[in-house]
Structure formats: C-alpha cells, structure tokens
Image: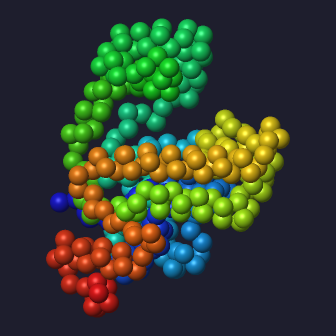
Amino acid sequence: MPPLVLVITGPTATGKTAVGAGLARVLDGEVVSADSMQVYRLLSIGTAKPSPEETLGIPHHMIDCASPFDPYSAARYVAEASACCDDILRRGKLPVIVGGTGLYIDALLAGREFASGGDPALRERLGREYDEAGGQAMLKKLAAADPETAARLHPNDRKRIIRALEVHALTGATLTEHDRASRAVPPRYDSLRFALTFARRQDLYDRIDRRVDRMMENGLAEEVRSLLAQGLTASHTAMQAIGYKELASALAEGSSVEQATEDIKRESRRYAKRQLSWLRRDADLRWIEWDRVPDPSAAVRQIAGAYYEFTGKEPPCKEATH
C-alpha cells in the first residue's frame, strides 16, 4: 500500500492556507505547497504566499525554491515535491499537500514519469521551424510520427505540437505511448483529498475581488516594478502569473493601473472557474462548501475526523475532531 498523504485543494481565495496549516498542526504534519507560482522567489504578494503568522510555525515546503528567471515544469515539481513528501514520511510525519495547481497535484500523487526533461536546444529549433513553416505543416509532421496525438491538437497549439515532436525525437516513443505507460504505473501515494469552495459562486468571486484589492494595497504594483527593474520580462514564466502579467503590461504601456487591477480580478475569476472544472473530474474528491465566509477551524475538525476514520488511528485528544 502506498504511503498516505492529505490533500487540501480548491480554487483560488478559498482559505486553503489556513486549513492546511491548521491540519498540519493537529495531525503532526508538514505542508507541501502545490502552487505553480509560489515556487518562485521574489513573487510574494501576487502569489499570496503565507506569512509567518499564517504558517502557524509549521514547516512549509516548495515555496521560494526557484529563481524567477528560471522556467519551472510539472516534471521538476514532481521530482522536488516527492523528495519533500518522502522525507516528511521518513520522519514519521504527515505530508499535507496544499494548493490549487491541479496538474501538479495529480502528477505528484500518480508518480508520473515525464517523457523527458527535454532538450532546450531542440525545442528552440522546433519552435523556429513552427514559426517558419506554420502550424499546419508542423501538425502534419507530427501526424507522421504520432497520429493519435496529432488528431487531438489544433494547428495553433504551438506548445503541445512542439512538445510532442520533442518527445518523439528524444525517446523514439510517441507522447500517446508515454501517457498510456504512465497511467499503468501504480500511484506513488495513497491520498485523502478535500476541496474547498463556496456554496454560491458569487461569494467566491466577491472574495477574489477583495483579495486583489488587498494585494494592490499591500504593494503588488511596486513588487512588479521591482521585478521588471531586475530584468524580468514577459518571456519569463514567472511573469505569466495572474497579477504580474497584467501590471507588467500596464506599466510597459503607460496605461492605467486601475484598469490593470480590474483585469486581474477578471482573470482571477476565470482561473477559479477553470480550477473548479479541473477538480470536478475527480469523483473521489470530498468537497467542503463555505456559506459566505470560510470557517477554517470547522474544516480542520471535519477533515481531521475523516482522517482518523480513514486510517483507523485514535486522535490524541478530543479537540482534534470536536
């Protein structure tokens, strides 16, 4: 039986940080972040990194572990986060995986072996070829090597076409074959998974808007200015994060920061909707729906109770579940 981890996920602005830290404290665990942008150093306000007070003194892993000048991939996340989880388990503690990046969580739990770390030079060459020959020609080229993957892609899907061609060139296998093999691999971890959301979608959207306002009050525009002054550009993955790309564009064009703020709110709401769509594919996910205002303490009690029931362990004290 694979070792057990606890997962707290959900769309942005649903209180995952408070619930995750509370559970780690109650269940003698440590938090492993599953947020694709909190991995970057220097990006703090716009990624809602937990403050020292919010961590409750619990170790938090996979935060501030990459330079904002570096690309960061799901493959790298799985390698580094699984090392964190395994270390936590070796020390007899519970990994509490907290975050809203569904791809990272799914890949970590599955123990997915990614096709290849990649070859930047090859990827760049394929990119130039795509730009020169066009998407239709490159999709035809992919169809000759991997017709099943090619049939799923649109000629404008530059990233996935290049990736599929790169994998085939490096491994001799199709991306389709690799995905099938990955699905046949037993999961790395057993998991008890919970998702936080709001009973009414408008309450979620209102909370997102208020959080963006707080980020702006806390200096998000100044944080973006500092990153740009250090040489980060729109070509860096870190600057594609919601909040950073809108403000960077506004600052570069001399347009309104107020309008950029509204754009951030809109894109954050859209992102939350995509997160919900991703999560609803998981039939084993247990949902906790807030009624207007999050109640982290109640959620911690509920989830801790489910954990003890699932594992058959006895809680150290009644307060853990009541």
Figure disc tally: 0
From what the image shows, is residue 102 above or below residue 294? above
Q: Is residue 316 left or right of residue 137?
A: left
Residue 134 in the image: x percent, y percent?
54, 11
User: Residue visible at 32% across and 80% down?
Assistant: 301
| Residue 214 x, y percent position in the rendering | 66, 65
Image spot of residue 294 (x, y percent): 44, 72
Q: Is residue 106 visible?
A: yes
Q: Is residue 170 visible?
A: no
- Front-lying residue, 277 or 141: 277
Is residue 269 depicted above or below 156 in this figure? below
Task: Between residue 193 and residue 254, name the one nearer to us.
Answer: 254
Name the spot of residue 178 as percent of width and height, x first: 30, 31
Q: Quadrant of the C terminus?
A: bottom left
Quarter of the image where one finds residue 182: top left
Q: Quadrant of residue 16?
A: bottom left
Location of the N terminus by quadrant is bottom left
What residue sits 27% from the left and 50% below the top?
282
Picture residue at 53% right of the left edge, 63% below the top: 207
Q: Residue drawn 40% across and 21% down?
A: 153
Colour scheme used in the picture?
Answer: rainbow
Name the side, left or right, on which 155 lies relative to 257. left
Image position of 306 (left or right of 125): left
